[in-house]
Image (spheres, rainbow, N blue to C red):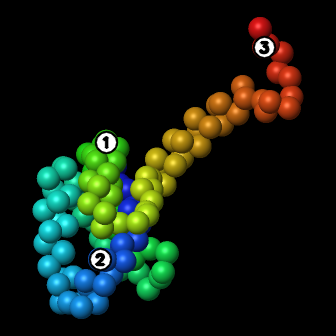
Amino acid sequence: MQFMILARYSQEVVKGIILDPAGIAVRDQHAFKFYSALGGKIVNYWFTKDIEYNFAIVVDFPDAEAAHAAVLTGYSTGAFLEGKLIPLCTTEELVGTLTRAQEAAAIFYPPTETGGDEA
């Protein structure tokens, strides 16, 4: 399962990397080791030229639990202020999802309408 993680560093981390820009390169090796410990494999990552998020990383995790564990671990350190964990899917997976949604749409009705199956 591939996930995109977007995250924003804390003020302390930003200050540290400004003082030691070369130190950010060492994070590459650490990130590979960290995600590997959870069974994940980095697909690619980027630093952003944005204020909202400082980096984006795509990781192939064995399951959603491993992805969630990675994000919780990062936040527990105080190094990150906010972020997003976004599950990704292939076109083939999306077609499967849309097929299931199509089947469910034949049954679903909004709360503002009656569907005839009230108890």
Q: How far apart are the two marked residues, 2 and 3, measured between alpha carbons?
A: 55 Å
Q: How far apart are the two marked residues, 1 and 3, measured between alpha carbons?
A: 36 Å
Neighbor class of circle 2 (other Cα within 10 Å; few <14, some 14-19, many 20+) is: some
Q: Which residue is mark 3?
A: 117
Instruction: Return the disc, 1 or 3, that comes first in the chain's sequence.
Output: 1
Q: How far apart are the two marked residues, 2 and 1, measured between alpha carbons?
A: 26 Å
Q: Residue furthest right?
A: 113
Of 46 and 79, the residue lying toward us? 79
Q: Which residue is mark 2?
A: 13
Check residue 65 in the rendering and tell me which mark sits there, or answer none: 1
Query: In this rendering, would 30 be left or right of 47?
Result: left
Q: What's the amino acid at mark 3?
A: Asp
Q: Secondary structure at mark 2?
A: helix
Is residue 90 among the parts visible in the rendering? no
Residue 27, by quadrant, is bottom left
Residue at 39 percent of width and 61 percent of height: 4
Nearer the camera: disc 2 or disc 1: 2
Instruction: Return the disc, 2 or 1, that comes first in the chain's sequence.
Output: 2
Residue 105 vertical position relative to residue 63 in the rendered view, above or below:
above
Is residue 91 among the parts visible in the rendering? yes
Q: What's the amino acid at mark 1?
A: Glu
